[in-house]
Image (spheres, rainbow, N blue to C red):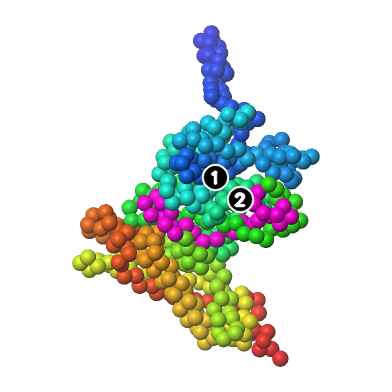
Amino acid sequence: MLKRRLCVILLIMMLVTSTGCWDRVEPQKLAEVNSALYDIRDNGQYCVVYEIVNPTSSGGTGGGGGGGNEKSPYTIASGEGDSFREAIGSIMRSTEKNIFGGHNKVRLFTERFAQKEMLSMLEFVARARFMDETSLMIVIKDAVPEDIHFSAVGLSDLMGDYLEDLANEQMRRTSKSVSVTTLDFIKDCYLEGKQPVMGVAELAEGGNKSSGNTVSGGGGDDDAPQIILYEGLAAFKDNRLVGYMNGIEARAYNIVVNTVDASYISVHSGDRQTVMKIDSSKADLKTFLEDDRIIVRVNIKAKLHVVEESGNLDVSKAEPLKTVEARFNELMQSEVEAAIRKAQTEFRSDIFGFGRQVNIQHPDRWPEFKENWDDHFADATVEVAVESSVTRTGQIKEPLALED
């Protein structure tokens, strides 16, 4: 009986002394980063700009921790240094709380940074203890990238939240952009036969003058804040930005790499058009090696449904539907071919991962090509074939234009 009591007492003491985290930091003592911008100055110094959540804010207007009756939902803090750690240390000199990047939503990169230096950032992120690998990677295509912190953020209070929702919604609705996490980017950097891509954000005039959550002090008129356009992709080669693809080209990229969620495509007949939604798409890649010649065959199968018919094409019947499918196949084939050709000729960067397929399908011969794969990719023959089928035509049968 005595031994049992002693055991119970010991167990209770162990539970009491082992609970909690020895190195915990209370949330109210953290400066939580919602988005981070990385830049490199002309003198070679790194610049880091953090959007830090203000936990005491109830929302509202105001920017950069500025004035107003209500506190801004965020504070902008920046620092410079010879390394990322020194730049962050510079921020900490005037920040009274512990900077915490574990919940960071997006990492933004200026063009000059992405064109010169990505390796040190990847090294820094991979080694950091509390860095979030799910943060989206986005290039800011603008001459004054810092203005992104003073642009309209839709229905959101924070830039990081807005860009994360914008990127995900674009992929779900149009597939004219890419949603690439930090981990995705790092993997593609070190994956044989595949080069990485990033999302692209661009500032444009046209903000809603009555928006209640825009901020002042940035680029442009306070009454007409800039808006953020999220479309296209940024192509990389050997950890450096080499060019951009527009929205149509980004959609073709998503079709080839099988990341299309949904997209609307119009096929024209004279001054009329049929609008279709891609319900699902599957690209099958086959590679063939003839001596040193590389052939890639991209076979795409898509399921569609008609969402709009502005002409008099009776999409309730089989023959007109075959016409629609044929027009879609021709259009999609030309778009995919153009995107691949751009990657081959302008970028000379295999962002589609054709080399990955060569590695998988011809492992015995891959060592012959891998060292200079992007050059082999640029010279490869790529054949694209598209096959589609319309599975639904909506809630009505004949187009209204055919009705008396």
Query: Which residue is drawn at the image coordinates 54% and 45% (left, top)?
Result: 37
Q: Where is residue 248 in the image (x, y as percent from the top left)?
A: 51, 68
Q: In which quarter of the image is the C terminus?
A: bottom right
Q: Which mark is residue 78?
A: none
The 10 Å Cα crowd at callout 2, few under 14, some 14 to 19, many 20 or more, is many
The quarter of the picture where residue 78 lies is top right
Which amino acid type is marked by label 2? Ile
User: Is tag 2's residue or tag 1's residue first in the polypeptide sequence?
Assistant: 1
The 10 Å Cα crowd at callout 1, few under 14, some 14 to 19, many 20 or more, is many
Residue under pointer 2: 148
Query: Which residue is drawn at the image coordinates 22% and 65% (left, top)?
Result: 292
Residue under pointer 1: 37
Q: Where is residue 305 in the image (x, y as percent from the top left)?
A: 56, 74
Decide whether residue 222 is among the magenta residues.
yes
Above or below: residue 183 compared with residue 233: above
* Labelled pair 2, 1 in contact (Cβ < 8 Å): yes
Decide whether residue 315 is among the magenta residues.
no
Q: Give the range drawn in magenta.
A: 218-243
In the foreground, 250 or 8:
250
Q: Where is residue 227 in the image (x, y as percent from the top left)?
A: 64, 57
Residue at the top extreme, as displayed: 2
Q: Position of residue 146 (x, y in %)?
A: 59, 47
Which amino acid type is marked by label 1? Leu
In the foreground, 10 or 129:
129
Query: Which residue is drawn at the image coordinates 52% and 81% (left, top)?
Result: 324
Residue at the bottom extreme, as displayed: 404
Query: Which residue is drawn at the image coordinates 45% and 36% (left, top)?
Result: 83
